[in-house]
Amino acid sequence: MRVGAIVRLVAVAVVMAGIAVAVALGFHWLPDSGSRQAGRIHFVFWFVTIICIAIFAIVTSVIAYSVVKFRRAPDDDSDGPPIHGHTGLEIVWTLVPAVLVTAISVVSAIVLAKNGDAGANPLRIDVTAQQFAWSFKYPDAKDIQTGILRLPLGRAAKLTLRSDDVIHSFWVPEFSQKQDAVPGIVTTVVVTPDKLGTFDVVCTELCGLGHALMRSNVIVMKPADFDAWVQQQRSALSGPPGQAGKTVFANNGCAACHTFTPAGATGKIGPDLDKLQAEAQKAGKPLQDFVRQSIVDPNAYIEPGYHPNVMPESFKDLPKGQLDALVQFLSRGSK
Ligand code: CUA
């Protein structure tokens, strides 16, 4: 091969690589990384992307060069020279992909192992998925249960996922990891947030009519702020029933669907909780029993004009103290 040909080949390869690099960098392909695990996953992504760009540049430059250089002359009807085998070439095109695929496997395996390692003292969080809501419980912190996930910056959190009904999947785009919540199986995912802020929690497994609405938030806080939040929750939940109940009401997102004046809630999706007294009479039950049943078994009595299976059943998993406080808060506040 002449030097001129090699120069032209390399020139085309550089142009092709430039185009591929522009496509790779010119678009915001991945969300900004918000956890150490995401950072490692992004590393694998770019490691593979760089290999792909190199292969793309080599293949397209050889094709482009061949199309131009070995193009058939207009009046040339002859066949090309017969070629049979080229041991050197075959070794190269077997060895190079083998090395690349092995390298990708090794890097991926290391990242997978690191991302699955929660370390010695992770923050434990129990995640329950249910049509169509997430709930998060902190067994290390008085079993606080909330509809919004809070994580301290820089500390590994081990999320244990369970599903009460069908398959859901936990996904925070900035954390780059997806983990299914499967009925009958316990799955885990480790997250070490390294960026403060509020991010979306998305269900990424089609789980029914409300799938698109099965969203929440994760708030990544400074460790001191997180500790203060846990402390404030602890004292609120062990305070007088009114205060504890109000906290449980706020934590579990009741205000998103219900109106309840003592909590300042104005939701319009579910029944008006200011009228619980009248509804309990209609249902023919003592107020407290009616309120408790409506929380743990919401389909037992459906207020006329509303639909079954809209209210999540996950509140039946509330720790007893929090459930009692909520029942008291609702029973006292309603007229
Ligand atoms: Cu839960 Cu989709």
Image (cartoon, helix red, strand yellow):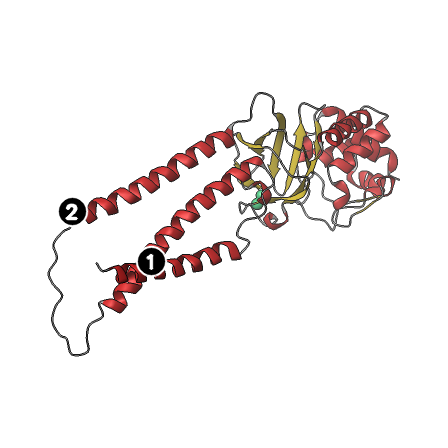
Nearer to us of marks 1 and 2 is 1
Amino acid at pointer 2: Thr
238 or 183: nearer the viewer: 238
Does 152 appear above or below 2?
A: above
| Distance between the alpha carbons at the discs numbered 1 and 2 | 24 Å
- Mark 1 packing: few (<14 Cα in 10 Å), some, or many (20+)? some
Q: Is residue 229 left or right of residue 169?
A: right
Q: Which residue is tagged 1?
A: 10
Left or right of 262: which side holds 133?
Answer: left
Relative to residue 195, is residue 65 depicted above or below? below
The image position of residue 46, as x and y in percent, is 47, 45
Q: Secondary structure at mark 1?
A: helix
Left or right of 307 on screen, residue 8 = left
Location of residue 215 in the rendering, given as x and y in whole percent from the top left corner: 64, 45
Q: Position of residue 288 (x, y in %)?
A: 81, 31
Question: Which residue is identified by label 2?
Answer: 87
Residue 93 can be seen in this image: yes
The residue sitting at 32% across, 60% down in the picture is 61
**Residue 134 on image: x %, y %:** 64, 38
Mark 2 neighbour density, 10 Å: few (under 14) some (14–19) many (20 or more): few
Q: Quadrant of residue 252?
A: top right
Q: Amino acid at mark 1?
A: Val
| Residue found at the very far front of the displayed protein | 3
Ligand 1 shown in quarter: top right
Q: Mark 2 or mark 1, which is nearer the start of the sequence? A: 1
Quarter-of-image position of residue 160:
top right
Image quadrant holding the N terminus, namely bottom left
- Queried on whether the Cβ of the residue with tag 1 lies below 8 angstroms from ligand 1, the answer reads no
